[in-house]
Image: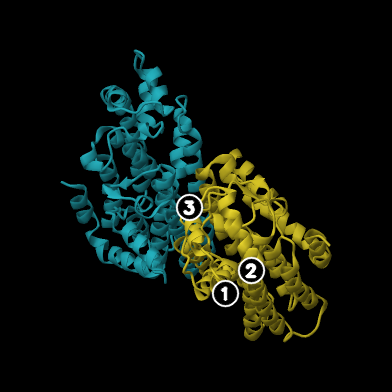
Chain colours: A cyan, B yellow
């Protein structure tokens, strides 16, 4: 089953609300400037998973669901996610995302910077509409942490000695923190108890870490047709991720360490230089070991979720764990 | 009298509070990441005028001054101003600001993007502390408008046919809007009446427009020693400002239009190409006409201010108008 079909099935119960989030996003993102609207429409048009919105809404469903409050929160989370993607694509000098040209590719870095900033500005108004001080601070702290995660990524680029611990610190900040905040925010606005709020936060954090590990595995194992970029794109960009860290720890080097250095330093330019290392990572034990880690985090997410009473919505959050592990891209 | 000496005298009554804003800024900007702190300290170390904070505090002084509320607002406004400067310096590819190297020059564009984003995130927490829905929306709307202004600037770069009206729309969005918001925010948090809030907003808007016109004049008339960049820097960057617009309207062209085109298109590279046009603008009637406009906006700001009862704080706001007009850089 395709990823899209799986998510359609999982999200069938919240589809009208997901659609309303999309509509409100577009309304709130609208500016008096045509170029902003064009760039915004393009950025929104990319086939996203709406994973963050679904987690916000489903976390709310476990208690007293208040869509009127979850709507601005979901839009704000999607908007800040899109803002960080826009700026990430500049940092990574990425010309495509999911096979489509990026905003920086089409309109230049400057417009991409400003569109991201514009989204940051707009999220402040959405969060203000919710009028809950806990959400205000959750949002501010989360965005600051995501920025710190991105800076960790920039600072550790090219570092062949990146440790497993530093990798986890980086992805916890950059990716998992926002996913955890979606779950936590959904819980806060649904009159969940403090214990439930913490459980859902921790569920999101573990799910988010598993999500990013799988992302980093797919970067090695999927090809351009599926994810819109060449296999081993992270490596080509100088990014050291878990499969490579484990590969370097576990496998006899056979001169590969030198070649990894060459690539990470930006001194490799041809497929003849990249592909042996990509294939070495793909065929070695690093991928399996990274996948084992992802499954461990997924198991923790599931255990936390199981402390809620059984319900159809809990089942969807449970199935989302499987989706994160088994998705194709 | 130097600019610094003038401001020291004008701000003597609020100096302890200005200092507290600086201290709180540094506290709130602190991150667990050394690089963020280093970049942040560097960005903060640039000699700023603290004009936005002074306007916020002095506007508050016209009614029931509540420094506990004005403190986070002032920090948030200074922080968002710094965030926009960080991103502006990337957009302008600026290597120095007020004679010091920019964050992008020292740490690269990526760190400068992320430091700006980090500040945006942190402002959300500061605004949340104020806990006033009017301020939430003022802040969100203002930052969105500033982003739109910057995009207008990017989109109109190189446009020799930029109209006076488009110039005013651009600077109202990019610069004056934030200055107006400082005054308005100060009024809102000091139990000012709706009429007083509007008056102070309009005072700030007119002052902000005068401020930017004078900035654009100084860009032509001051030399590298004073402002840290060569005379006519805006022109070299392809930016069409009021002195040039009026020069093109008023003066016989003598082939200068062609040369302006060449510069705005980025096809001029030597001082021999730049300086005749810079000197033509400086010596022609464009500067005086732009200055007349600045004085008109300043007069409007003064008339609005005079509707408040006389007070020492109103006098400072009044003298700030003169400072904006007569400053050296």
Marks 2 and 3, Cα distance to the nearest angstrom? 23 Å
| Pick the front one: A154 or B48 | B48
Q: Position of residue A319 (x, y in %)?
A: 26, 48
**Side of A273 relative to B286 (left or right):** left
* Residue with the mark numbered 2: B284
Q: Position of residue B145 (x, y in %)?
A: 51, 68
**Side of B88 relative to A176 (left or right):** right
Q: Position of residue A297 (x, y in %)?
A: 37, 38
User: Which chain letter goes with mark 3?
Assistant: B
Residues at discs 2 and 3 in contact (Cβ within 8 Å):
no
**Label ID, residue B30:** none
In this rendering, do the residues under marks 1 and 2 share a single chain? yes
Give the quarter of the image for residue A54: bottom left
Closer to the eye: label 3 or 1: 1
Residue name at image x 40 percent, y 50 percent? A85
Q: Secondary structure at mark 1?
A: helix
Q: Position of residue B298 (x, y in %)?
A: 69, 77
* Residue with the mark numbered 1: B250
Q: Residue furthest left?
A: A1
Give the quarter of the image for residue B208: bottom right
| Pick the front one: B76 or B234 | B234
Whether B156 is drawn above or below A250: the answer is: below
* Residue with the mark numbered 3: B266
Residue B33 appears anywhere in the view: no
């Amino acid at each position: 089953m395709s990823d899209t079909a799986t998510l359609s099935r999982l999200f069938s119960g919240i589809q009208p609300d997901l659609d309303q989030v999309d509509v409100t996003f577009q309304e709130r993102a609208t500016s008096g400037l045509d170029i902003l609207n064009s760039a915004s429409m393009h950025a929104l048009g990319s086939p996203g998973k709406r994973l963050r919105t679904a987690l916000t809404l489903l976390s709310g469903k476990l208690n007293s669901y208040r869509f009127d409050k979850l709507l601005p929160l979901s839009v704000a989370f999607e908007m800040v996610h899109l803002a960080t993607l826009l700026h990430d694509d500049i940092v990574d000098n990425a010309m495509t995302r999911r096979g489509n040209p990026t905003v920086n590719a089409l309109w230049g870095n400057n417009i991409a910077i400003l569109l991201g900033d514009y989204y940051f500005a707009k999220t402040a108004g959405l969060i203000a509409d919710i009028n809950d001080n806990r959400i205000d601070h959750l949002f501010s702290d989360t965005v600051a942490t995501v920025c710190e995660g991105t800076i960790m990524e920039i600072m550790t680029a090219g570092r062949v000695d990146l440790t497993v611990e530093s990798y986890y610190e980086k992805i916890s900040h950059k990716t998992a923190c926002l996913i955890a905040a979606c779950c936590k925010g959904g819980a806060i606005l649904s009159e969940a108890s403090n214990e439930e709020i913490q459980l859902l936060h921790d569920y999101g954090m573990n799910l988010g870490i598993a999500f990013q590990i799988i992302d980093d595995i797919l970067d090695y194992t999927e090809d351009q047709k599926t994810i819109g970029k060449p296999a081993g794109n992270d490596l080509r960009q100088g990014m050291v991720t878990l499969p490579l860290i484990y590969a370097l720890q576990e496998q006899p080097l056979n001169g590969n360490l030198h070649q990894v250095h060459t690539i990470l330093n930006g001194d490799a330019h041809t497929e003849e230089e990249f592909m042996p290392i990509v294939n070495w990572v793909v065929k070695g034990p690093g991928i399996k070991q990274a996948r084992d880690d992802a499954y461990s985090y997924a198991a923790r997410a599931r255990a936390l979720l199981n402390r809620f009473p059984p319900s159809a919505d809990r089942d969807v959050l449970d199935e989302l764990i499987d989706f994160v592990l088994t998705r194709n891209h």
